[in-house]
Structure formats: structure tokens, C-alpha cells
Amino acid sequence: MADTNIYSQSKQLFEQAQQQIPGGVNSPVRAFHGVGGTPVFFKRADGPYLYDEDDNRYIDYINSWGAVILGHNAPVIREAIEQQLQNGIGFGAPTAIEVTMAALICKHVPSIEKVRMVNSGTEATMSAIRLARAYTKRNKIIKFNGCYHGHADSFLVNAGSGALTFGQPSSPGIPHNVVENTLTADFNDLRSVEQLFKNFGQDIAAVIVEPIAGNMNFVLPDEGFLAGLRNLCDQFQSVLIFDEVMTGFRVALGGAQSIYNVKPDMTTLGKVIGGGLPVGAFGGKKDIMNLLAPEGPVYQAGTLSGNPIAMQAGIAALHAVEQAGFFENLQKNTHYLLTEFKNISKKYGYTLTSYAAGGMFGFYFNDGSPIHTLNDVKKCDLEFFQTFFHLCLGKGVYFAPSMYEAGFVSAKHDKTIMDATLNVIDQVLHQMSSR
């Protein structure tokens, strides 16, 4: 573990927080349960850096879990927010800003013909499922082990005793009769999905999937997997939902669906489209979206949905990422980081497996085997990762505090920042190899 003395303020704050906040945090992954130790409390951020309450500086590879694609405290985002503040925080009524945001989303994600704004990714995914069930007049959904779609009851499901069984609630407080309509399969295992459709196809309303899985570290879809899901949904007239809350405007301007050229019926978004502020959205084909109230009978509402501050920040972010070469540069810097990371690992006798798309990446300490499923991730060296994480943290590099979370690069992570990171990685792996 890193020297706890350099985190004295964080340690004190964490002790205080646990008195009033369950677990001392407002989102579980922040608690460092995946790596051990005391979570770091931050007070400011700028560009590629975070600064904690003890004034330690870190190169940040979480970037607010992907939302901060332009770097922390980006002037263009700050100016958009400040401008809107002059006109008001929110009105609880329609604004022209919402119309502009909707047009931008529909322009860059062609599968989205109509879109509705919400306030989080969880809201987006649970609303998409409700709409899919209403559209198909069916009950069951298919989700994949290792994919996370928020904390709505239908999604907090563990696999049953096999791919053909119903899932089991993975959290107390979720009735069995809620998740009995959630079927589970393994990511990249198309045969298991085919079997589920064979058994339950006439009652499957939707398949929901992260087209690139970002919640079991970072796992790319195998060739033909997404296209196979598209074909199955077409064959059985089920709704295909791509959860692009993480990948939307992160891996490419048109999201993962534009990389793999597979068009879903519905898409959920978040993160980047809020410019770092809380936001979510779901959209898709007109004939599905037209079922939403007030146009249709499916009820969904949100007092702060499409609030003008988040919309202005999101519009500024989207205008920035639509500039020519933006994602190519992001991809180049990410590729450089991972290529040199592999070279350093090899120098010290370690094997590193890594993947990337746009400004999103994952790395694994394993035997070099490719990563296709959650079970592959579980075979990686967790203890090694935990040690690596804390040693990097102590030297000012902040990776996600869990082996099961993806990493993110911002536009401010240039070659200079990458080289500084690689220097820390070299020091850490040298230290670990000398033990």
C-alpha cells in the first residue's frame, strides 16, 4: 500500500463521511473496495490533473468515468455554464437549448430519430426497457453478464445456473418476480443468445448490451457478435438496445455503433453529452419513441430533464468533439500509452493484455490470453493489479480503483502527459519486479 501519511486529509474526511453517508461514499466504486485502502478525496481539477485535499496532484485516467472528454475544467465548458447562469438555472419548461441538443444527437447518431433527455444513465436504460416492452407487448429482456446498465431492479441480476435459466437478484430489496423476466447470457457468446431466443423468443421484448463493455474493464465485441444480435432481434421482432452511456461520443463521434456498423433500434447515452454535468438520454426509431407520453401512452417524466445548464455544457462538448481529427488524435495518444505500457511490462517480465477504442481503454495483467468474457477478466491477477494501483497512486497516477473498470483519456492527455505516466509505470513495475 502507498504511504497513508500523504492522504491524511482524505483519511480524516473518510472517517467523518462514514458517520452520515453509507460507506462514506455516494457511489460504491469510490470506496476503494476493489483495491483496499482509503479513498482519495479531491478538491479541484484542471486539464489532465486532479488535486486532492492534501494537495497531491494526479494524472487522471478516470475523467469522471468518461464524462470529461475535453479535460477537467475546460474553458469552453466553463464559459457555456457561466453564460447560462446569467439567464437562469432552470425553468421547468421547454427551452430552445433542448431542441439544439436533440438535433445534435440525432445528427451524429443516425439510429436515433427522436430522443428524450433524462438525468442519468440509469434513468435512460430503465426508460428504454419500459418503452421496448410497451412497443413489443412482451415482458422478457436479455442482458449480458458483466455489462452494467445502472441500478434499476431489472438490471441487478446475476446469471443463474446456466445460460438458459432466469437470473437471480444480485442485491437485497429486489423481488424475484421482478427479475424473473430478465434472462442472462455471456458477452460475446452468440450461441447462448440464440438458445434463449429459441426457448423464449416470443416473449423477449429487448436485448440490451454495451456494444463495447466498459464495466468489466474494457472488452471489445467479437467479430459478428453485434451483427448476430441485430439479426436475432430482426428475426424475432425484438428491440435491440445499445447502452452507449459510456461509449457514446467517447469511442467515436457516432458511438460504438458507427465503428461496428450495426444499427440498434434504441440507444442510451450519458456522460459526454452533459459536458461533465449529470445527464442521460434515450432515443431511437420514431415509431418506438412516439409511444412516449404525451404523444403516446408510455409514461416517463423528469422535473430537471433537459435542464439548461447541463444542455449548454453538453452542446459545447459536442461541438468540440465534432471537430475534424478529434477522435483520431484521442485514439493515437491512447494507442501510444498502451503500446509503451506493454513494452515496459515486457522489460520486467510481465505480460500485459490491452484494448482501446477512441479515448477508452482497458489493461489486464494475465498470461497474454485474449479477453472475451467476464470469466476471462476474473482470471486476471487481481492482487498484482491492487499493488500496481496503489504504487501508481502514490506516484501521482490515478487509474480506476477496480480491475473491473475501464480507463479514459481526455483531449488534455498529450504525449507529454503520457510520457510522465509511462515513467511512473516504469518505476512501479521495476519496484514490483525487485521484491
Image (tube, rainbow, N blue to C red):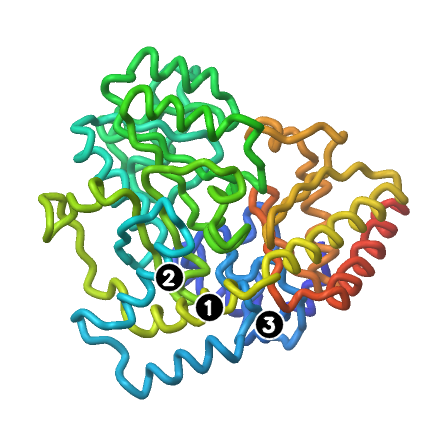
SS type, badge 3:
strand
Number of numbered discs overlaid on the protein picture: 3
Front position among marks 3 and 1: 1
Label 1 belongs to which residue?
319
Label 3 belongs to which residue?
52
Instruction: Give the image quarter of residue 82.
Output: bottom left
| Spatial separation of the CA atoms under disc 3 and disc 1 | 30 Å
Q: Earlier in the sequence, mark 2 or mark 3?
A: 3
Front position among marks 2 and 3: 2
Q: Is residue 107 left or right of residue 358?
A: left
| Spatial separation of the CA atoms under disc 2 and disc 1 | 9 Å
User: Compared to 280, does 299 lie above or below?
Assistant: above
Q: Amino acid at mark 1?
A: His
User: Compared to 323, does 144 lie above or below?
Assistant: above
Q: Are marks 2 and 1 in contact (CB under 8 Å)?
A: yes
Query: Which numbered dot is residue 104?
Result: 2
Q: Residues within 10 Å of mark 2 (few under 14, many from 20)?
A: some
**Quadrant position of the N terminus in the picture:** bottom right
Q: Earlier in the sequence, mark 3 or mark 1?
A: 3
Identified at 35% across, 69% down, the residue is 310
